[in-house]
Image: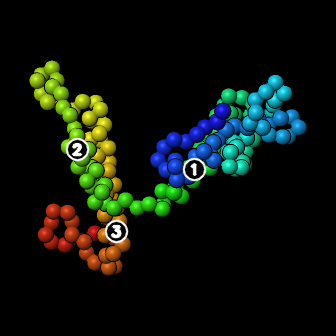
Amino acid sequence: MGITYCGVYADAINTDDHEGYAARILPDGTETGTWTYATREFIGYRAHCDCGWRGQHHYPATEQGEQLADDEWDHHHLRPLLETEARRHTVPATVLLAFSRELRESLTYTTDAQGDRVLTERTAGVLDAASRLDNLLDDLSREVTSKHQPPNRRRRAPGRSMPCEY
């Protein structure tokens, strides 16, 4: 039994073809994903995927070695597949901004021992996620603005009406 990814873009990358597992390396050098009495003695692990991909490294025949092989499949095979798929899609900033607003509007409050209105722990996490999204949008906006700004042009500091020297 291996690892099957069930997250974002799972259908797009056809995860049925990308089940990862730590294959056993047998003493004769063959590699197998089958665990039977005949394969009980093995000398290590190597990352494998049902699609035919094979990891570059051999790991010890330990629980840690098995985990390292699984991690190699995740980092060097699955994630690149997901990143390739993600690059095919663009989410407009207006959609992200609307999502941030929806997150903020969904916040729920509770009352503390002093009777003050406070965020619940879960809601504080939602607010943190919305704030991170807002910061990302600000960073992207600054990046785009700086790429389109002519060289040697003075920029206005936020909140100032006069240009300032940098």
Marks 3 and 2 sit apart, C-alpha to C-alpha, by: 26 Å
Q: Is residue 162 left or right of residue 121?
A: left
N-term-proximal mark, 1 vs 2: 1
How many numbered markers are drawn?
3
N-term-proximal mark, 3 vs 2: 2
Q: What residue is shown at x 48% (from left), y 56% (from top)?
A: 86
Q: Which residue is mark 2?
A: 104
Q: Amino acid at mark 1?
A: Asn
Examine the image and state in which quarter residue 152 appears.
bottom left
Any part of residue 38 in sight: yes
Q: What secondary structure is marked by label 3?
A: helix
Q: What residue is shown at x 33% (from left), y 61% (from top)?
A: 92
Marks 1 and 2 sit apart, C-alpha to C-alpha, by: 34 Å
**Is the C-beta separation of discs 1 and 3 under 8 Å?**
no
**Is the C-beta separation of discs 3 and 2 under 8 Å?**
no
Answer few, some or many: residues within 10 Å of disc 2's Cα (few below 14, many 20 plus, some between 14 and 19): some
Answer few, some or many: residues within 10 Å of disc 1's Cα (few below 14, many 20 plus, some between 14 and 19): few
N-term-proximal mark, 1 vs 3: 1
Q: Which residue is mark 3?
A: 144
* Of the two numbered discs 1 and 3 in the rendering, the one whose residue sits closer to the viewer: 1
Q: Is residue 153 left or right of residue 77?
A: left
Q: Amino acid at mark 3?
A: Val
Up/down of 123 relative to 13, above or below: above
Q: Which residue is mark 1?
A: 14
Query: Percent from the top left, x then y, of residue 71?
Result: 61, 40
Q: What residue is shown at x 64% (from left), y 38% (from top)?
A: 70
Position of the C terminus, as image quadrant, is: bottom left
User: In the image shown, does 9 or 96 lie closer to the viewer?
Assistant: 9
Q: What secondary structure is marked by label 2?
A: helix
Examine the image and state in which quarter residue 138 appears.
bottom left
